[in-house]
Amino acid sequence: MVLALFDAGVGVALTAALAIAAVGSGALTRWAGAIAFLFGAVIVVIGGFPFLALLVLFVVASVLATRFRFAEKKRRNVHEGTSGERGVSNVVAHILIPTGLVLTAGASTSLLPPGALAVLYTSALAFGAADTFASEFGVLAGRARSILTFRPVEPGTNGGVSAIGELWALAGALTTSIVAVALFAAFAAPHLAPAAFLIVAPIGGFLGCQIDSVLGETLENRGRLTKGSTNFFGMLSAVAIAAALLLVFGMWR
């Protein structure tokens, strides 16, 4: 689980280089980049390279989705940041749970076995991809409806969903899971059968995205949650759903 000293040094150096590149390209603010480096270093040292690689690919996909037709999003005031950059709250909301999972497994494999860790970690990032894709592509659909009342709402409204956005959410969750299978196999890291990734992780990620929308409409719109805390609880629900499915199907190992 914990990398050897040399590999750990390489992993930390790689994480630093990636964080610097993210800040330099305008994908992250400076403070967000610093936080991403700190948490990313923990993930790669304790979890290993496939965990870092999956996180990096998630960040890259999120940046590309955010910058897709960005000028149009900015005109409609549904854009992220001033030029598509992600700030501290966004990074913290999406990296706390993946890091916590890795730390838990590193402390006790009996509490969180390697195979279950790989699937739950993937589920967390599947949620992140589903939420980001649904928001960044769905907002361009031109119409949206409340996830609770189905009444028409402005695209970009908390709790607003569209058919296109839901399809992108499913695509994000499933793609993340497919990439995870390839990465864990390529690095020969302990993981469950591909079916666990291709069924459990996408379900957790997609349903977590729906819970995020419900929280956005019921609590964030009333000022009881921030965008970051809504994302955090959405990701937490995705991991909880995935964990429940692993236990039900007898795959907690």
Image: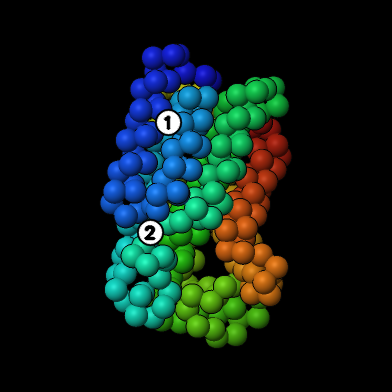
Marks 2/1 in contact by CB < 8 Å: the verdict is no
Q: Marks 2 and 1, Cα distance to the nearest angstrom?
A: 25 Å
Residue identifier under label 2: 85
Task: Please name the amino acid that badge 2 sits on.
Answer: Glu
Q: Label 2: state its secondary structure.
A: loop
Give the residue at mark 1.
Answer: 50
In this view, the residue farthest toward the front is 31
Q: Position of residue 27 (x, y in %)?
A: 35, 53
Residue kind at label 1, given as amino acid type:
Pro
Which quarter of the picture shows residue 101?
top right
Percent coordinates x, y for residue 88 in the rendering? 50, 53
Sequence-first disc among 2 and 1 = 1
- Residue at the image point whose x is 44% and y is 42% from the top: 34
Residue at the image point whose x is 30% and y is 43% from the top: 21
Of the two numbered discs 2 and 1 in the rendering, the one whose residue sits closer to the viewer? 2
Splitting the image into 4 quarters, where does residue 26 fall?
A: bottom left
Q: In the rendering, at what x and y percent does residue 114 appear? A: 58, 25
Residue at the bottom extreme? 152
Asked whether, in this view, residue 234 is left or right of residue 85, the answer is: right
Of 91 and 35, the residue lying toward us = 35
| Disc on res. 12 | none
Residue 90 spot, x, y in % from top left: 50, 55
Of residues 238 and 99, the one drawn nearer to the viewer in this rendering: 99
Left or right: 240 as drawn, with respect to 62: right
Q: Colour scheme in the image?
A: rainbow
232 sits to left or right of 49: right
The residue under the point 53% across, 55% down is 89
